[in-house]
Amino acid sequence: MDIFVLGVGEAGDPDFCNSSVAVTAEGFRLLIDCGHSVPPSLWRALPDPDAVDAVYFTHHHPDHCFGLVPVLIRWTDDGRRKPLEIVTTAEGRHQLTRLFDAGGIDPERSRQFPLVWRETPGERTAGRIGPFAVHSAPTVHAVPNHAIRLEAGGRSFAYSGDGRPTPEAEDLYRGADLLFQECFTLRADPTQPFHAAHEALAGLPERLGIGAVRLYHVRRDQREALAASCAGDGRMGLALPGERIRLG
Ligand SMILES: [Zn+2]
């Protein structure tokens, strides 16, 4: 399993594009989230219109899904014919359909490739996306957010989306080889109840038996402090844009 980090930023970050990763196994590539500032990074890193087989949305805030419309338009212009799986909730599908309407995309006529809609796999029943066995779990966020765990080739990767871990999310992350965890601030901030803080994540890898944790979606004024706090921590550190991580 290969993880390519497209972006690590939060919604208003001027330097880092919105958080998004592309996960590949057996030649199948899954994009997790596609926020408003993701498209240029995606086009630079993966210019082939057929490069992505499926898109999973953790939730439907603009910095996690508003990039899909321009991406679909470019893939159409570039002659994509391959179907695209979109994995999200019923509410997420409804929102994306309205976005397509607002963006002037007629799903039946202007696109030359079909969209295959798939419901977010449940917490107990494993779903499949391409070669990946998939589970999800809710986090504490302002809108429903489904953290995801992917397993393929005996390796496991978990991605939180936004929000503090719930007990269900901790179960999802347990024993993963790698966890990408949203971490907005260094200290717990009572004005940010829907985001995780580094001090509340202390000991998480050891407690849940996670191989490594990468923190992302860090508030734009917190990166330096967070990096300093993680210095010397062998298991927890900041995710870096452009990083490629191979599991297995
Ligand atoms: Zn959010």
Image (tube, helix red, strand yellow):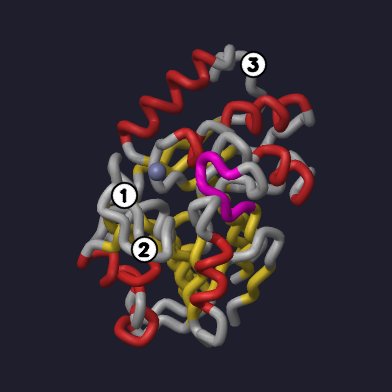
| Residue 209 vertical placement versus 96 (above, below) | below
Q: Label 3's element?
A: loop
Q: CA distance from mark 3 to mark 1?
A: 41 Å
The amino acid at mark 2 is Ala
Q: Label 2's element?
A: loop
Dominant SS of magenta comes to: loop
The amino acid at mark 1 is Gln
Q: Which residue is mark 2?
A: 197
Q: Nearer the viewer, residue 166 or 89?
A: 166
Q: In x, y percent, where is residue 37?
A: 62, 38
In what quadrant of the picture does the N terminus appear? bottom right
Q: Label 1's element?
A: loop
Which residue sits at x=47%, y=47%? 56
The amino acid at mark 3 is Ser
In what quadrant of the picture does the C terminus appear? bottom right
**Is 184 positioned to the left or the right of 113 in the image?**
left
Looking at the image, is mark 3 or mark 1 nearer the viewer?
1
Contact? badges 1 and 2 (CB < 8 Å): yes
Residue 110: mark in rendering:
3
Which residue sits at x=58%, y=12%? 104
Q: Check mark 1 vs ligand 1: CB closer than 8 Å? yes or no.
A: no
Looking at the image, is mark 2 or mark 3 nearer the viewer?
2
Residue 133 visible here: no
Which residue sits at x=47%, y=74%? 213
Residue 192: mark in rendering:
1
Q: In x, y percent, where is residue 102?
A: 51, 14
The segment highlighted magenta reads 7-13
Q: Earlier in the sequence, mark 2 or mark 3?
A: 3
